[in-house]
Structure formats: structure tokens, C-alpha cells
Image (cartoon, grey):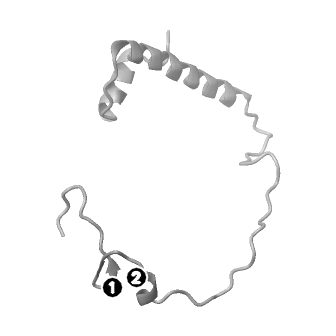
Amino acid sequence: MSAITRDEVAHLARLSRLALADDELDHFAAQLDQIVGAVARVSEVAAEDIPPSSHALPLTNVFRPDEVRPGLSPEGALAGAPAVEEDRFRVPRILGEEA
């Protein structure tokens, strides 16, 4: 029996506001079931004596030290802006938000 059912995929699609066809529900259910199975196999392999790691090789920081440098003034930053309002970039309103 599969771990991920067609009904669960349909529920996730509704929550995600995705319109999926019947054949897509079956296809995604099978794919998600394979993913869950693969994760389960990986968790079986993980041993207590192996420390967790985020990378196979150790990483070192290659960045230079931080140095304080002069930055742009508000006037300089806004100099090339197409529209400015109260010392800020003026952009079009989106999603019907109120001012």
C-alpha cells in the first residue's frame, strides 16, 4: 500500500490552489510515494556513531574582513529613481493594499 494517497495529493493541490487533472493526481501520488520511500531508506542508514554534517568536505570562509566604507547618502541613492516620495522610492501599489 502506498504511503501517499490520491486523496492526499488532491488535498495538497487544493491547499496550494493547483488545478490538477485526474491523471496528474495519480502521477504525483506515485512520485511523492517514491520520495517518501527514499527518505525512509536514508533514515534507516543513518547510524548513531556518525556525526551529522551539512557538507562532505570542511568549508572555510574565503571572504575578506569587513571594513567600514562610506556609503550613499539618501539623496545619492534616490538620484536615479523614477519617482521619490518622502525620501523613499515610490513604487506602484500592488494587491490592492491600502496606503
Residue 45 at x, y = what percent?
Answer: 73, 28
Task: Please give the name of the residue rendered at 25% of the width and 59% of the height, measured from the top-left corner.
Answer: 94
Q: Nearer the viewer, residue 51 or 69?
A: 69
Q: Secondary structure at mark 2?
A: helix
Residue 93 at x, y = what percent?
Answer: 23, 63
Residue 23 at x, y = what percent?
Answer: 39, 12
- In terms of image quadrants, where is residue 35? top right
Distance between the Cα atoms at labels 2 and 1?
8 Å
CB-based contact (under 8 Å), mark 2 and mark 1: yes
Q: Which of label 2 and label 1 is nearer to you?
A: 2
> In the figure, is residue 10 to the left or right of 32?
left
* Amino acid on which the number 1 mark rests in the picture: Asp
Which residue was labeled with disc 2? 78
> In the figure, is residue 10 to the left or right of 55?
left
Task: Please give the name of the residue rendered at 52% of the width and 20% of the height, measured from the top-left corner.
Answer: 31
- Marker count (numbered): 2
Q: Nearer the viewer, residue 19 or 79?
A: 79
Vertical comparison of 85 with 16: above or below? below
Task: Please give the name of the residue rendered at 57% of the width and 19% of the height, measured from the top-left corner.
Answer: 34
* Amino acid on which the number 2 mark rests in the picture: Leu
Vertical comparison of 65 with 95: above or below? below
Label at residue 87: 1
Tell which residue pokes out farthest to the right in this image: 57
Vertical comparison of 51 with 99: above or below? above
Vertical comparison of 10 with 85: above or below? above
Q: Secondary structure at mark 1?
A: loop
